[in-house]
Amino acid sequence: MQRQDSSEVPRRKADLLAKFRGYRKIKEEKRDGGIDITVLNREKERTLIRIVTKTRLASGNVGVNNVKAMRKALEEDKIESGILIAKGFSHPSRREARRNRIEPISEKSLPSFNIFNHQLVPKHEILPIEEVEELLKRYRTKPYKLPRIKSSDPVVMLIGAKPGDILKITRKSLTAGDYITYRHVVWRD
């Protein structure tokens, strides 16, 4: 049996993430300790997806130094935002990443297959601002009064929803046809 490359599984998960967020790959390069993938997002802004396979910490988690190195790479290449995928993160590194427009994603929280192919996972969409305003006006409510969904939910992470976003979830029902519900994305606990 052949030994798998340590970056193969996170690489597949990063490809899946890019696909669901509607990113288009521009370039990919291997570097010491991981892989860098530059993509264009839906707003035609560049995003750097960095997969970290080796760190200096004994736990294998990403430290603040990894985040600072990524921030430096973003500044040098004039890239607007970043996604850091790793085995795990220290608490200070997670905080530092969010301060620098870098989204820290734990490798184990990303699915390794297309979860939308499962019959129990309905269609999720991020509502545009205009539709959010219309929805809140129609139901005379505030976002915090809607049912919540955590930002750590695998579907939320895959489609790229941020805390504060409103999701439109369309379920198939045998009795009601298409059933639409809305969720407010909140920070994970």
Image (cartoon, grey):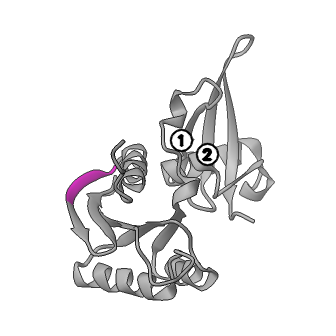
Residue drawn at x 51%, y 69% is: 104
Q: Residue furthest front?
A: 1
Q: Nearer the viewer, residue 48 or 163?
A: 48
The secondary structure type at the circle numbered 1 is strand
Amino acid residing under circle 1: Glu
User: Which residue position holds label 2?
Assistant: 167
Would you say the residues marked 2 and 1 are in contact, meaning their CB atoms lie under 8 Å apart?
yes
Residue drawn at x 69%, y 46% is: 183
Depicted 12 relative to depicted 152: above or below? above
* Residue 44, visible in the rendered structure: no
Main secondary structure found in the magenta portion: strand
Amino acid residing under circle 2: Leu
The secondary structure type at the circle numbered 2 is strand
Q: For mark 2, does the 10 Å Cα neighbourhood hold few (<14), some (14 to 19), or many (20 or more) residues?
A: many
Q: Is residue 17 part of the magenta span, yes or no?
A: no
User: Which residue position holds label 1?
Assistant: 125
Q: Which is more N-terminal, label 1 or label 2? A: 1
Q: Residue furthest right?
A: 145
Q: Is residue 176 left or right of residue 131?
A: right
Depicted 155 relative to depicted 79: above or below? above
Which range of residues does the magenta coloring cover?
A: 23-27
